[in-house]
Image (cartoon, rainbow, N blue to C red):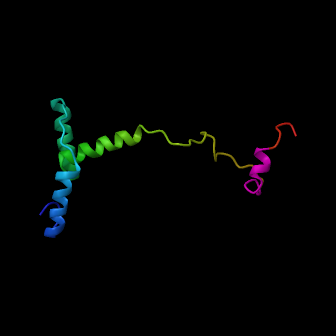
Amino acid sequence: MIRGIQCPRLLMAYICHILYAMKRTSVFLDEQLLRQAQEQAGREGKSFAQLVREAVAGYLLGSQKPATRLPSVAGQFASGCAQTADRVDELLWREPHD
């Protein structure tokens, strides 16, 4: 049994996924970082390889910038006008000095 997988067919599917969907690689870590990663994997109840996969995926996702980013002041103030959302086109697309 692999971490809760009891069904033989499910176990076979899991093994096939691991063998054919992933590529093996090498990572060079200093002793301290390797030890810390192994200990962290143990605390989380996962394999070292799973911890590395999740860390790389998290790093890559974190480095992607959002497609549209709002200014930091967006949503910070109330205009006091209840129909601003209904008049958004009128308010945003008029001449600036009307």
| Quadrant of the frame with the N terminus | bottom left
Nearer to the camera, 91 or 16: 16
| Quadrant of the frame with the C terminus | top right
Q: Residue furthest top?
A: 30
The location of residue 43, given as percent across then percent down, is: 20, 49
The location of residue 20, given as percent across then percent down, is: 19, 52
The location of residue 83, given as percent across then percent down, is: 77, 57
The number of numbered badges drawn on the structure is 0
Q: Residue furthest front?
A: 20
Query: Which residue: 14% across, 60% down?
Result: 2
The location of residue 86, given as percent across then percent down, is: 75, 57
Answer whether residue 15 is magenta in the image.
Answer: no
Q: Residue furthest left?
A: 1
Say whether residue 20 is left or right of residue 56.
left
Say whether residue 70 is left or right of residue 1.
right
Query: Which residue: 21% across, 40% down?
Result: 37
Magenta residue span: 82-93
Nearer to the camera, 84 or 65: 65
**Residue 88 in the image: above or below residue 38:** below
Query: Which residue: 16% across, 68% down?
Result: 9
Nearer to the camera, 44 or 70: 70
